[in-house]
Image (cartoon, grey):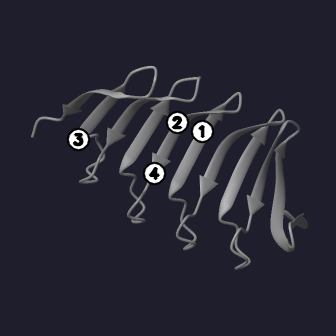
Amino acid sequence: MTKTKVENGKRRTPQWVDRTSPTEYRLAIDTNGDGRPNTIKTVKDGAVVQVESDRKFNGQVDLVQQYSKGILVRETRDDDFDGKPEMIGHFRLNGTVAIVERDPQERGAADIVEYYDKSGHLTRRKLRPK
């Protein structure tokens, strides 16, 4: 990756660019100044298609957001930072949440599936049989 510094207000934020194809590149950003990237944006045809974040700053990705035409369509979260996702959210192309799958026991399958209407309100919750 090529390292560059980009002005961000008064602070200079280190960024690295890795071109993966003629139409795609990855932009790695060090948001906390520790010298390691903690946000990686994948850009294809000029649009962000994925953002990977290390919210705990421990070198592990714990949030992955996927985009279509600039709108969030899927989000995978590891909120206890153990390397296993607890939540996958699916979004409509208008940006509202459609379905949330939860795996609080981290068994690799959703224990809870929540369904939302077009305005983003929870309409139904389904629990996996034990």
In contact (CB < 8 Å): disc 2 and disc 1: yes
Q: Whole-Å distance between the Cαs marked 2 and 4?
A: 10 Å
| Relative height, residue 66 to residue 16 (above, below) | above
Question: What residue is shown with label 4?
Answer: 77
Q: Quadrant of residue 116?
A: top left
Are the two marked residues, 4 and 1, in contact with CB atoms closer than 8 angstroms?
no
Instruction: State the residue at coordinates (64%, 35%).
Output: 67
x, y percentage for residue 77?
Answer: 45, 51
Q: CA distance from mark 3 to mark 1?
A: 23 Å
Which residue lies at the image location 73% right of the left edge and 68% below the top edge? 30
Q: In the image, residue 124 lies at what x, y percent?
A: 26, 26
Which residue has dot 2 on it? 74
Report which residue position mark 3 lands on: 111
Indicate which disc residue 35 carries: none
Q: Secondary structure at mark 3?
A: loop
Is 93 on the left or on the right of 15, as rendered? Answer: left
**Residue tagged 1:** 66
First in residue order: circle 4 vs circle 3: 4
Front-most of 11 and 99? Answer: 11
Q: Amino acid at mark 4?
A: Arg
- The answer for how far apart the CA atoms under marks 4 and 3 are is 15 Å
